[in-house]
Image: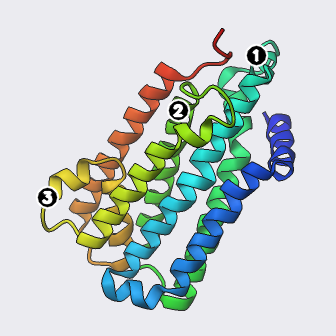
Amino acid sequence: MVGIARSELVQVFRNRLVLVSGLVIPVAVSATFVYQHETLADQASLGYIAAIMLFIVMAFGLYTTAVTTLASRRQNLFLKRLRSTAVGDVDILIGLLLPLTAIALVQTVVILAVLAAVAGPPADVAVLAVAILVLTAMMIALALATTGLTNSPEHAQVTTLPISLLLIGVASWVGLTGTSELTTIKQLLPGGAVTELVMGAWNGGLPLTDALQLLLRSVGWVVVAVVAAGRFFRWEPRR
């Protein structure tokens, strides 16, 4: 597993497509949000800025790059060759996805730290950390599921777009309009509960019971994504 992860880390920095989608785009967009934080905070809140930047990093930096990477490894039969070794399936996937996950989490920490430095720290770091981890798990599972519907690395730019736009759209809707209206609908949408959890963790004033309810609904989407991953993920190309 460690050897696979080390090899994948090298490949990440050699692949221009992965570098652009996984590093350049999230950092550039997040920098814009940080630069405009005063204006955006007046329109919504600092919690919204934190949430939307988190979703951008996870959608492009983790989800899209993971699908691209897995589709590429499957297309060149690297996944098939790995399965013929003594390494188990779970260890193979961990090795392949660990570098991308680590990079996305480092990006998230750095970007949110910059926001905290210029605009003020979050009210509840622990809840924020839990929300980040739950979203990370959901995005990894969604990446595995989407890979099963993706024929090639180039095709990944198409297959990942609907979920990426949906999640960022939900985060924007919840962040800009709040949950005083259509509360249940917004929280049950994919990413809706996580968005509110991040906003509450950053802005403060989130009761423990509400946080637990949001966490439960967020974990529910992780379960859905894991089930979808088990259903759709393929180790070999379609014949």
Instruction: Specify the quadrant that holds the C terminus.
Output: top right
**Label 2, label 3: how far apart the Cα atoms are:** 29 Å
Relative side of 11 to 224, left or right: right
Q: Residue 116 placed where, x, y %?
A: 53, 83
- In the rendered structure, which amino acid carries the disc numbered 1? Lys
* Residue at the image point whose x is 36% and y is 52% from the top: 191
- Residue 182, numbered circle: 3
Crowding near the residue tagged with mark 3, few <14, some 14–19, many ≥20 C-alpha atoms within 10 Å:
few
Q: In this view, does 220 lie above or below 202?
A: above
Relative side of 3 to 176, left or right: right
Check disc 1 and report its element: helix, strand or loop: helix
Q: Which of marks 1 and 2 is nearer the N terminus?
A: 1
Crowding near the residue tagged with mark 1, few <14, some 14–19, many ≥20 C-alpha atoms within 10 Å:
some
Relative side of 143 to 195, left or right: right
Report the residue marked by disc 1.
Answer: 80
Q: Is residue 161 above or below residue 82?
A: below
* Residue at the image point whose x is 60% and y is 73% from the top: 111
Q: Nearer the viewer, residue 11 or 20?
A: 20
- In the rendered structure, which amino acid carries the disc numbered 2? Thr
**Which quadrant of the structure image shows residue 4?**
top right
- In the rendered structure, which amino acid carries the disc numbered 3? Leu
Report the residue marked by disc 2.
Answer: 146
